[in-house]
Image (cartoon, helix red, strand yellow):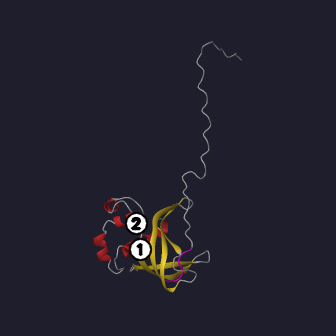
């Protein structure tokens, strides 16, 4: 076996790069906003505190998250009091999108003052659904026209919450009927 030849002044190979620092499992993660409790069966008047889109990396699903403050309880509302905060989440991707997307539009239409039976009026107001997108916190031409703010924050809506099907976890799905609230 031949011995390796080394000569003085020969270029040395570049040092190996330092091993990459392991990215934290928390990189890119924001603090979660609690989404419990959801409203119990009843009729309410809510003030919209926050709306945003969410993404669950584990299930690869997108959602529309609504934070509401209870202004009045007309009936039901077991476990809630005026002033409580409740959360509503609609899935907007995957198989649940077929139900979730129209529910988001119904909520946004109510915040804009449209009766749920006036689909034609709402379609005329928001044909491209830019208002809905602005309600999710995304910047677009609608949100820019209203000063770059989420137009739904502070809106007052009335809602009848009814019991839907049971969930596999022992809870139940909630059905929401939104209408414009009176201040």
Residue tagged 1: 107
User: Which part of the image, by quadrant, shows the N terminus?
Assistant: top right
In the image, what residue occupies the spot 35% across and 73% down?
112
Q: Classify residue 15 by image quadrant.
A: top right
Q: Is residue 120 left or right of residue 52?
A: left
Question: First in sequence: mark 2 or mark 1?
Answer: 1
Question: Local crowd at mark 2 within 10 Å, few (<14), some, or many (≥20)?
Answer: many
Q: Is residue 183 left or right of residue 68?
A: left
Check if mark 2's residue and mark 1's residue have beta carbons within 8 Å: yes
Viewer-proximal residue, 180 or 161?
180
Magenta stretch bounds: 37-43
Q: Is residue 98 visible?
A: yes
User: Which part of the image, by quadrant, shows the C terminus?
Assistant: bottom left
Question: In the drawing, what numbered circle is on residue 135?
Answer: 2
Viewer-proximal residue, 126 or 148?
148
**Magenta run includes residue 38:** yes
x, y (%) of residue 109? 36, 74
> How many numbered marks does the figure carry?
2
x, y (%) of residue 134? 38, 63
Q: Is residue 92 visible?
A: no
Q: Classify residue 124 by image quadrant.
A: bottom left
**Magenta run includes residue 106:** no
């Amino acid at each position: 076996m031949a011995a390796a030849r080394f000569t003085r002044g020969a270029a040395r190979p570049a040092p190996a790069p330092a091993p990459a620092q392991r990215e934290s499992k928390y990189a890119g993660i924001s603090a979660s906003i609690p989404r419990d409790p959801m409203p119990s069966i009843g009729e309410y008047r809510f003030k919209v505190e926050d709306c945003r889109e969410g993404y669950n990396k584990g299930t690869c699903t997108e959602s529309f998250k609504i934070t509401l403050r209870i202004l009045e309880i007309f009936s039901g509302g077991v476990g809630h009091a005026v002033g409580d905060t409740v959360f509503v989440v609609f899935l907007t991707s995957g198989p649940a999108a077929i139900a979730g997307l129209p529910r988001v539009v119904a909520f946004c239409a109510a915040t804009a003052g449209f009766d749920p039976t006036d689909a034609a009026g709402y379609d005329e107001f928001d044909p491209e659904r830019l208002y809905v997108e602005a309600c999710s916190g995304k910047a677009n031409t609608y949100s820019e026209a209203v000063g770059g703010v989420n137009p739904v924050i502070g809106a007052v809506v009335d809602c009848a919450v009814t019991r839907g099907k049971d969930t596999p976890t022992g809870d139940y799905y909630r059905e929401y009927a939104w209408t414009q609230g009176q201040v």
